[in-house]
Image (spheres, rainbow, N blue to C red):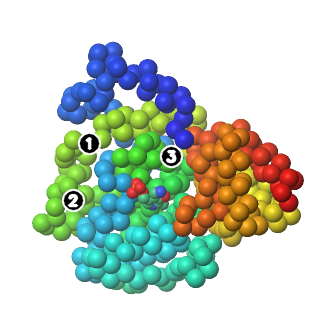
Amino acid sequence: MLPTDVLQRAREELLSFNGIGMSIMEISHRSRHFRGVLEKAESGLRELLSVPDTHRILFLQGGASLQFSMIPMNFLAGATADHVVTGAWGKKAVVEAQKCGSVNIIWTDQANGFRTIPDREELRFTPEAAYVHYTSNETIEGVEFDHELVAGGTPVICDASSDILSKPIDLENYALLYAGAQKNIGPSGVCVVIIREDMLARVPAGQASSLDYRAIAEADSMLNTPNTWGIYIVSLVCEWLLERGGVVAIEQQNKAKARSLYSAIDSSDGFYTGHAARNARSRMNVTFHLPDDRLDAQFAAEAEDAGLSGLKGHRVLGGIRASIYNAMPLEGVEALVGFMGEFSKRNG
Ligand code: PMP
């Protein structure tokens, strides 16, 4: 979901942005009007996430998936990268990294169906690793870190696509943090990369310019025409979130929403079974299943008829997945909890 207020504002400004008689999609990205939008998106993210001056914020295209390739292309170059793999997206990142160097999977829960996360003390980093990569929230399995990974001297790189802006994080911990925008930041087609300045100096010479973090940073994310519409929506989402108390306030709301759903699962006498271990339960993607596949399908279909859409689990995992990103109001979750109670009474 995107916040309804944001969509309404975008609708109002669709034909004439800032009263200039043209849409943001029709004006030059070099114009002062778009410059203002880009600055607003950047300063909004900087304020919301308390991004330190040591880090640059870049707006890229190609989704989070392109980062799976760009990161090793820029920073691996034949060396070793540590990967912590807690779900399907982390696995995809490994496949791309292996094309550029060697990958040491220092922790994975794959054999157990990706249900949990490592303890802080459990991880042993490869001494010469170029970086360690992890996924703070695995969107498909609904497995989220309840702490930030800290790796001593090893640069930490994080795919935060599905939990960025849902809670405060300490950017000082990260050499690079990236997120496809289409969950909590805006529409698809924009990927936010927050990168520590010193990493830019590590980009090897001869890198294709469009895949070169340093070149993109030097061009202020405008090496080529950026996704102007997408960045505009990002600027509005940031404004919306700032007006509502930022990530500290939204975290409280996200906690309440997740608590409500997980307690519906836990109090169902086993009718609903959560996928993730308790310490790894995602506040963004609540995954569970019913006693059999037939009931999973019936649940998703009847929920759809009741106006609760998008609940069918990802094809990789099956079951049910309730994605309850920032813009989902508590009432939406309460409606689902009500439906779950009623459905289990009828079918339990
Ligand atoms: N990482 C995570 C954690 C995701 O949830 C997704 C998309 N759902 C991706 C990467 C891939 O993102 P994109 O489609 O923007 O390439």
> Where does residue 313 sit, x and y in percent of width and height?
60, 59
Q: Which residue is found at the position 20% from the left and 55% from the top? A: 210
The three-letter code of the residue at mark 2 reads Asp
Tell me if residue 343 comes above or below residue 86 in the rendering: above
Three-letter code for the amino acid on which mark 3 is drawn: Asn
Is 213 placed left or right of 83 in the picture? left
Residue 123 in picture, x, y percent from top left: 52, 80
The quarter of the image holding the N terminus is top right
Q: Nearer the viewer, mark 1 or mark 2?
A: 1
User: What mark, if any, has residue 226 been given in the picture?
Assistant: 1
Residue 184, numbered circle = 3
Which residue appears at 71% of the width and 48% of the height? 302
| The quarter of the picture showing ligand 1 | bottom left
What residue do we see at 60% from left, 76% from top? 113
Q: Amino acid at mark 1?
A: Pro
Numbered circle sitting on residue 278: none
- Whether pointer 1 and pointer 3 mark residues with C-beta atoms closer than 8 Å, the reply is no
Q: Residues within 10 Å of mark 1 (few under 14, many from 20)?
A: some
Earlier in the chain: of badge 2 and badge 3, it is 3
Residue drawn at point x = 31 percent, y = 66 percent: 69
Residue 100 lies, with reference to residue 63, above or below; the image says below
